[in-house]
Amino acid sequence: MTKKLLSLWLVMLPVIASAQTIYETISSEKLGQTREIKIQLPRNYEANTEKSYPVLVVLDGDYLFEPVAGITDYYSYWEDMPEMIVVGVNQAGHRESDGFYDEQRYLPADTGADFFEFLGMELLQKIDEKYRTAPFRMIVGHDFTSNFINYYLLKPEPIFQGYINLSPDLAPEMADRITKVLSSSETKKWYYMATGSDDIPQLKTKIMAFDNQLKNINNKLVEYKFDNFEGATHYTLVGKAIPSAIDEMFKVFRPISRRDYEEVLLQTTVSGYDYLVEKYETINELFGIEKKIRLNDFMAVYNAIEKTQRWDEYKDLSKLAEDHYPNTMLATYFEARYEEETGNPKKAMKTYKKAYGQEKIAFLTVDFMLDKAEQIKKDFGY
């Protein structure tokens, strides 16, 4: 596993090197002091002026920002997660005061309450004002700050939808409170937690007990994943947990996989067209992103239709292709296949010929389309 992680980091080095980090200082009325933050904008942020981006807040930004920002940039480059604005909050010298909670209610108090309001009322507001942000927000913390991020879940309308807990140092009653909140949540939530076989024993005991509570939650709106990494210490688990959390939280965002193709699209009871539409509607609804349907996802549905012979689906798929890839041969090809397989060869032949003057796409070229038309002409003697 160590060799695999080393290989991943070596692959990521040029990606991280090309990502630009902005260093800013924020003056906070809540804290009565200034705070240093780090911001990584998506690669093409300046060029894509019409695009908005979800926000990922990283506590312990003095050491946690770089691994989170690097993996985020790497995964988004391969479209395994949406491009995000990553904001790291440096807490060197402030960790304990930032996460302070009282010993009676076990809730943020004094400097902890100030820091709670700083993140929610000042930092995020400044990020929203200065950058193009989408509604979806995530937050990540490690041990003491991991406990702190959970306080946002206790609010009636949490400002974060995704929570990455790296070996949390849980306050008393936190496990019961979060279990109750997630069990009754009426909005979508992502919750990730990780420990390791060599984690700090007193932390791990509480984390394992907390996991036993969370895994019994019966709420379809909550996506929960837990990892207990073999051989990982309190600090090395971070490098394994971040990509694992991202894999889980953004699985709907990823391109249609071989597993999706075989276990979903090839099932005759499932409409490939409906699956494709619902996938991208979900991406829009959850992450606030109007995403163009990937060509490879169109091709996955196309191959499934050819295998299952659900020819009627080509009709709607053609209209969808026209919306996302206008002026190309994609919609024309799907329309022609529909006519060809539903008993209208002459109409299919004419449709294939419409490709002349359209842009080629994937395997579709003018020669290919005209050859298809010519073959129908020969077969039926037109």
Image: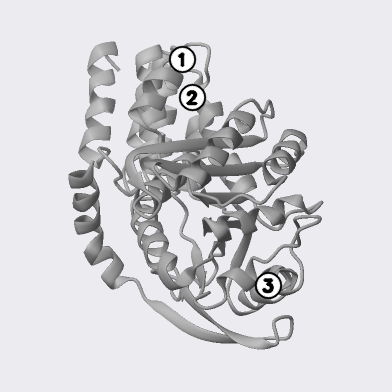
Q: Residue at x 70, y 58 (%)?
A: 159
Please report whichever mark, 2 or 1, sits nearer to the chain's N-terminal start.
2
Q: Residue at x 68, y 72 (%)?
A: 115
Instruction: Determine the CA span between mark 2 and mark 3.
Output: 48 Å
Question: Residue 358: where, in percent of width, then height?
Answer: 35, 47
Question: Position of 184 compared to 118: left or right?
Answer: right
Q: Amino acid at mark 3?
A: Phe
The circle on residue 310 is 1
Q: Amino acid at mark 1?
A: Arg
Q: Nearer the viewer, mark 2 or mark 3?
A: 3
Residue 134 sits in quarter: bottom right
Q: Amino acid at mark 2?
A: Gly
Mark 2 and 1 residues: CB-CB less than 8 Å, in contact?
yes
Task: From this view, report whether residue 303 is shown above or below residue 243.
Answer: above
Tag 2 residue: 272
Mark 2 and 3 residues: CB-CB less than 8 Å, in contact?
no
Task: From this view, report whether residue 25 is shown above or below residue 296.
Answer: below
Foreground residue, 83 or 227? 227
Say few, some or many: other residues with alpha carbon within 10 Å of mark 3 (under 14 / 14 to 19 / 20 or more): many
Assign a secondary structure to mark 1. loop
Foreground residue, 17 or 322? 17
How many discs appear? 3
Question: Position of 289 compared to 248: left or right?
Answer: right
The colour scheme used to paint the residues is one colour
Task: From this view, report whether residue 51 is shown above or below residue 220.
Answer: below
Question: Position of 191 compared to 218: left or right?
Answer: left
Say few, some or many: other residues with alpha carbon within 10 Å of mark 2 (under 14 / 14 to 19 / 20 or more): many
Tag 3 residue: 115
Instruction: Determine the CA span between mark 3 and mark 1.
Output: 57 Å
